[in-house]
Image (tube, rainbow, N blue to C red):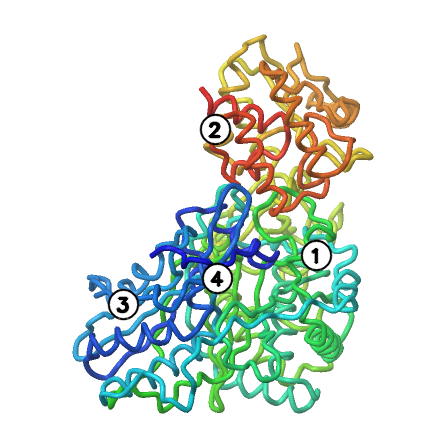
Amino acid sequence: MSLSTGATARTASSKERSLWMLDRLVPGAGANNVPAALRIGGRLDRPALRTALTAVVRRHDALRTVFHAADDTLTSSVLAPGEADLDVQEIAPSADGPQAALTSFAAPPFALDGRPLIRAGVLADGDDDVLCFVVHHLVFDTVSAGVFTRSLARAYARVLRGEQPYPPDEGTGPVPVLDEPAPRPRSTDFWRDHLAGFDPGALETDCGTGHNPDRPTLAGGRLDHTLSPGATAAVRKLAKELRAPEAVVLLAAYYLLLAAHGAGPDLVVGTPVNVRGDGAADAIGYHVNTLPLRTAVDPGEPFRALVTRTRNVFFGALSHADAPVDGLLAEVARPGASWRGSLFRHVFNYVPAPGDAGLTFGDAPARTEPAETGYCKFDLELNVLATPDALSLRAVHGTEALAEADARALVRRYDALLSGLGEAADRTVAEIEVGTDADRAALRTGYEETVRAGGAAGFVAAPDGREALPGVRGELCLVATSRTAADDGYDGEHPLHGPYRRTGELARRGHDGTLEVLGRADRRVTVHGVPVQLDRLEALLASEDGVRAAAAVLRKGDDTGTGGLVAFLAAPDDPQLLDRLRKRIGAELPAAAEPGAFVVLDALPTAADGRPDLAELERRAAAGGATGAGASDDTDGQLLADLIELWQDILERDDVGPQANFFELGGHSLLAAKVAQRSGKLAGVRVRLADVFANPTPVTLAEHLRAARA
């Protein structure tokens, strides 16, 4: 299909461009696809379904809205009704079952090349048909899915009866796209104040993979869990007692769960809300704003106070939901070159009972069928489905951030936490236990097996001094073998294990109780929002042929806000050494672990104990300034100069050097798209948005561009 003659193109909004940025970051992923499926009790009449589907699409301008992406420009226009003529595909069955078949249908991305952003298919599954439709988020949301489904069911029934898809009294003209009003200035001011001073580093938890790749796949996993009767009863009891919606009680508990896993105490959780105004409840389109709800989790306050503050934040945000938060990205500090949204990495969504009760297609009953794309934009999305009888969870997690075992443990701990909160409204957050019987058994078993094996008994301590849950990183503490031994030089006393000494080692218990030592706790730093273990980096550097010694330090930011890793090497003058090291780092460590500068010395300065003098190396790194001490030579000096000028132009500042980090100087994904497009033209190569995230300084992007040209 082509654009209709005379169709007027408009420039995409900031909200639409934010979605497009995700498409550009992972071009082969359908992370922006919105799938929905219905299981039909019988067979669908394919010609009637096609006629009804075409009628619904022709009816709604939103479903005929198409987009054109070119360079860093995104525009949209609306096809004429006669140009929208959809087919119904037959979905191929899968040996892994209907869910796998639906995912295969839902996952492929749409091209933003002027074609409609909707497809529909039918899967024959036993005696049933499963109807699945997939629409790009640019023109659709979950509210739209319900409107679309009901409209399609009515049109299908009329076509089966030999009637027109829409009755005459509903009119025959198209339904225009809902035009959202401009945000009120006071709402923009509200979000600016609400997010002022927020540190995105507070969102990092101490569980999961610890991996935050600059070139993500957005692979996602899904877990379904029905909350125990005790948890559901506790939530509804607290909602009445504290005079708060049960969604607020559930959200407050989610904050507490995240804090118990190392996030916070200053936390932001994203919550999607419908921004359709009065009289527009049945509008199809992209009319959702994901609100970044910020609150603090104070260990000394009662849970009752956390619920009250969460309620105030929740309702305050709802009253200012008209301002798209995407438009504030340029005004909110975004330290770190991470593809993840710096405003939130965890999502909470409360969904009342689905509205498909009694839905039929012709004479056949229809009910909602799960459909997933297999992608996830965030670390963890917690969706709560509420019915009068039960609360169910659908947890979707990014597998690059959370392994399935960690995601499953979080869901079970959330259930256990809610169950215990029924009688704990007045207990402080520090007194509320987060963990399951399985967690306690794993900790006990791991400790006892170490003792029986004759090893040094120890436990993993969380920052608050309590024993860390399985899968959660903390400091390894060794337990005294006797009270006499404990009398000399021990650091504290655990209520279960007795006197202990801190080791300074980072460790975690596995979910089976096994102990894993991860490296020195004081050698773990955060670079561009990503945790990096410096001793792992140093071990890799030192293992390269010719490197006699290696040390890495984090250069503190100067007055331009730049900073990064600097690696010092005792090594011969080898022109190929740095290229070999960069390749190994890229293959074995997170992208953030690659030093922004290398300094090659005859020998490293040493401290009194014979180890590298880190204090002296930090001083030398800081003395290198924004240009980066020992930065690798750029054989194409003009390209580097052009990129520095590009940084200055896009960021509108003149304090940019070769090692200046684009994102730490105020850049964000929308501006990064301009860098990708314009730097590609400079070098005559294609530059992806992910390439800018992976190479956020002029010198590293210059190296990437030279390699691409070669």
Apparent side of residue 267 relative to residue 691 in the rendered image (left or right):
right
Of 537 and 428, the residue lying toward us:
537
Residue 296 locus on image (x, y percent): 74, 65
Residue 685 numbered tag: 2
Q: Is 389 placed above or below 195 here? A: below
Image quadrant for the N terminus?
Answer: bottom left
Q: Which residue is mark 1?
A: 328
| Residue at the extreme right | 559
Q: Which residue is mark 3?
A: 121
Residue 629 locus on image (x, y percent): 71, 21
Give the foreground label among 1 and 2.
2
Q: Is 445 placed above or below 660 here? A: below
Residue 246 locus on image (x, y percent): 61, 83
Pick whichever of labels 4 and 1 is earlier in the sequence: 1
* Contact (Cβ within 8 Å) of mark 2 with mark 4: no
Residue 407 numbered tag: 4
Q: Amino acid at mark 2?
A: Val
Residue 696 numbered tag: none
Pick whichever of labels 1 and 2 is earlier in the sequence: 1
Q: Amino acid at mark 3?
A: Gly
Pick whichever of labels 2 and 3 is earlier in the sequence: 3
Image quadrant for the C terminus?
Answer: top left
Name the residue rendered at 60%, 41% in the picture. Answer: 672
How far separated are the C-alphas under marks 1 and 3?
A: 38 Å
Of 387 and 655, the residue lying toward us:
655
How far separated are the C-alphas under marks 1 and 2?
A: 31 Å
Mark 3 closeness class: few <14, some 14–19, many ≥20 residues within 10 Å: many
